[in-house]
Image (cartoon, rainbow, N blue to C red):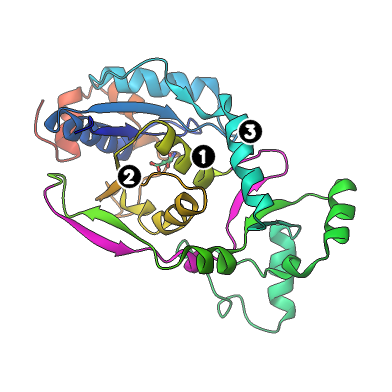
């Protein structure tokens, strides 16, 4: 059997916090238990929000926690050509279209329909679904706008894509022992016409993540429960692009003292702040509920 491969894939757009520590340490623990590998991948496609300082901080924090990883590390910003090729395939297959409405346009359109913002369907993250009017634009009009420099994003025609792919599901582990998996139905339509690439960046989180997981031979994606529903879109993209599909385990989230999800701006749960305040790697393990190393 092939070596099991896990990965921890942070974005350097902020400092790592306790939730990241849990995810990274759990990936390591599961890889070790399976005699497998754990890769570190830097998800830095957002060139405006990701910085070399945050990236250095990630390496520093993970080293301090006692983690090691294979080098060179895959940094997504070095692979735009590969993502572009996948995007072009989706364009050729007629599964994506240029969408010209900005967030403000979407809000104004929803208001104009006479429905309150609350009545408009929303995706699992609470974002209003894209009104998909651009799908009806002629090829000529699309070209005219694109050539004229209008801002746009490539959105997946979710109905067409889901119809083509048929019923999809993924294998979700019941717990971190990976001894029992259940089938979870993918419901990509819940996300509406998601963005798969932008005009200036030929990819998106969803597109790069499925390509990289396949390219790097990731067999098990272990990540936070906050990405559970996003897996439906990723299953769909894997199918459209003929990619291998990993198995999944979405782990519990580490919550802040207020019971809410941690964010990268919460300095008091940041690993470097905890380290500066005298915490040890052992303290971090205890704080996230992992046994001592
Ligand atoms: N880069 C993503 C994040 O920082 C995680 C991607 C994943 O694990 O699929 O939230």
Q: Are the residues at dot 1 and dot 3 in contact (C-beta closer than 8 Å)?
A: no
Disc nearest the viewer among 1 and 3 = 1
| Tally of numbered discs | 3
Instruction: Determine whether the residue tagged by mark 3 lies in a helix, strand or loop.
Output: loop
- The reply to whether residue 128 is visible in this rendering is no
Sequence-earlier tag: 1 or 3: 3
Residue pictured at 48% horizontal, 39% vertical: 211
Tag of residue 246: 2
Q: Is residue 258 above or below residue 75?
A: below
State how far apart marks 1 and 3 are (Cα): 17 Å
Label 2, residues with CA under 10 Å away: few <14, some 14-19, many ≥20: many
Q: Quadrant of the N terminus?
A: top left
On the image, numbered disc 1 is attached to which residue?
A: 208
User: Residue at 80% of width from left, 66% of height from top?
Assistant: 137
Tell me if residue 5 can be seen.
Answer: yes
Q: CA distance from mark 1 to mark 2?
A: 14 Å
- Which residue matches tag 3? 48
Residue 63: image quadrant is top left
Using the image, determine if residue 158 lies above or below residue 25.
Answer: below
Query: Which disc number belongs to residue 102?
Result: none
* Label 2 with label 3: CB-CB less than 8 Å: no
Circle 2 or circle 3, nearest the eye: 2
Marks 1/2 in contact by CB < 8 Å: the verdict is no
The residues tagged by marks 2 and 3 sit, at their Cα atoms, a distance apart of 30 Å
Q: Which residues lie in the magenta part?
A: 179-203
Closer to the camera in the image, 51 or 178: 178
């Amino acid at each position: 059997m092939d070596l099991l491969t896990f990965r921890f894939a942070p974005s350097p757009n902020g400092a790592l916090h306790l939730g990241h520590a849990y995810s990274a340490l759990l990936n390591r623990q599961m890889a070790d238990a399976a005699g497998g590998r754990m890769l570190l991948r830097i998800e830095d496609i957002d060139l405006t929000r990701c910085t070399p300082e945050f990236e250095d901080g990630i390496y520093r924090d993970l080293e301090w926690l006692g983690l090691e990883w294979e080098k060179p590390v895959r940094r997504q910003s070095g692979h735009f050509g590969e993502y572009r090729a996948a995007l072009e395939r989706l364009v050729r297959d007629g599964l994506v279209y240029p969408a010209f409405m900005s967030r403000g346009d979407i809000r104004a359109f929803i208001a104009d329909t006479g429905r309150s913002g609350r009545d408009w369907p929303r995706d699992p993250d609470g974002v209003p679904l894209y009104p998909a009017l651009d799908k009806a634009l002629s090829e000529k009009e699309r070209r005219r706008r694109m050539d004229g420099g209008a801002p746009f994003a490539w959105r997946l025609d979710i109905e067409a894509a889901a119809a083509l792919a048929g019923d999809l599901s993924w294998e979700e582990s019941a717990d971190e022992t990976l001894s029992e998996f259940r089938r979870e139905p993918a419901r990509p339509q819940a996300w509406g016409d998601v963005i798969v690439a932008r005009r200036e960046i030929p990819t998106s989180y969803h597109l790069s993540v499925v390509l990289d997981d396949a390219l790097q031979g990731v067999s098990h994606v272990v990540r936070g429960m906050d990405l559970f529903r996003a897996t439906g879109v990723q299953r769909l993209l894997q199918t459209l692009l003929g990619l291998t599909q990993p198995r999944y385990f979405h782990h519990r989230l580490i919550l802040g003292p207020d019971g809410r999800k941690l964010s990268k701006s919460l300095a008091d749960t940041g690993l470097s702040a905890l380290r500066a305040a005298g915490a040890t790697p052992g303290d971090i393990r205890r704080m996230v509920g992992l046994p001592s190393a």
